[in-house]
């Protein structure tokens, strides 16, 4: 004998025979349904993450995304581990912008270079910087040590216990450090305001 369909054509399943199967192995991040809730076929009921596939998702301003490309190196500092810097590479850049705080941003996914060294952390914040230029054996100073007078840039040095203004030529900058191409020598004592 057949059971009549219940509520809008849905047939109740026997609780003992029902089985919920996830499409992958992983950790449950959230559950949006409770025991006894009605669920439609193929309706998501939560979120699962695979900790063996950790990656970082960041939003990059439209004005900066043109400097990035697949495979570009990134440095990652996880909020829970501020004393460790992890390396990674850009794995994906969204083709369409999203709006965040009234500005166009692009979603960028970064894969860790050595996942074995990354703590299994999910949904943790991170600070990400992209390596736009990589140079070896350069002289750098804190960016805030460089001052400007018109078009001339200079730093204050300490020589013989007295401050001395020295004009410099700058190269690449990372925002908080700047390369000095000319004007200083290794070992010079720079005054940082």
Image (cartoon, rainbow, N blue to C red):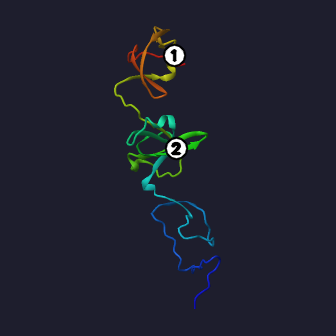
Q: Nearer the viewer, residue 177 or 90?
A: 90
Q: What percent of the width, then of the height, locates residue 174?
A: 45, 29
Residue beneath disc 1: 147
> Could you tell which of marks 2 and 1 lies nearer the N-terminus?
2
| Residue 174 position (above or below residue 187) | below
Quarter of the figure that contains the N terminus: bottom right
Give the quarter of the figure containing the C terminus: top right
Residue 139 in percent (x, y) is at 39, 22
Q: CA distance from mark 2 to mark 1?
A: 37 Å
Q: Indicate which label's residue lies in the foreground, 2 or 1.
A: 2
Q: Quadrant of residue 104?
A: top right
For this orientation, the residue located farthest to the right is 7
Q: Is 192 located above or below residue 102 in the figure?
A: above
Q: Residue at x 43, y 38 (%)?
A: 68
**Which SS class for mark 2?**
loop
Residue 9 location, x and y as percent? 61, 78
Q: Nearer the viewer, residue 75 or 161?
A: 75
Dot 1 surroundings within 10 Å: few (below 14), some, or many (20 or more)? some
Quadrant of the rendered image containing residue 141: top left
Instruction: Say if 143 sits above or below 30 in the image.
Output: above
Q: Which residue is mark 2?
A: 97
């Amino acid at each position: 004998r057949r059971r009549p369909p219940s509520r809008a054509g849905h047939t109740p399943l026997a609780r003992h025979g029902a089985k919920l199967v996830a499409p992958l192995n992983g950790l449950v991040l959230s559950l949006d349904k409770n025991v006894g809730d009605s669920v439609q076929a193929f309706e998501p009921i939560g979120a699962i993450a695979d900790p063996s596939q950790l990656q970082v998702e960041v939003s990059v301003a439209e004005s900066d995304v043109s400097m990035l490309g697949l495979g570009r190196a990134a440095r990652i500092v996880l909020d829970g581990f501020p004393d460790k810097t992890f390396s990674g590479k850009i794995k994906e850049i969204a083709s369409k912008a999203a709006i965040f705080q009234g500005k166009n941003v692009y979603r960028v996914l970064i894969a860790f270079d050595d996942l074995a060294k990354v703590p299994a952390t999910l949904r943790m914040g991170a600070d990400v910087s992209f390596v736009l230029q990589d140079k070896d054996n350069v002289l750098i100073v804190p960016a805030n040590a460089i001052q400007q007078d018109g078009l001339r840039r200079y730093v204050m040095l300490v020589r013989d216990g007295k401050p001395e203004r020295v004009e410099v030529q700058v190269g690449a900058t990372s925002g908080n450090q700047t390369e000095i191409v000319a004007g200083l020598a290794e070992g010079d004592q720079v005054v940082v305001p």
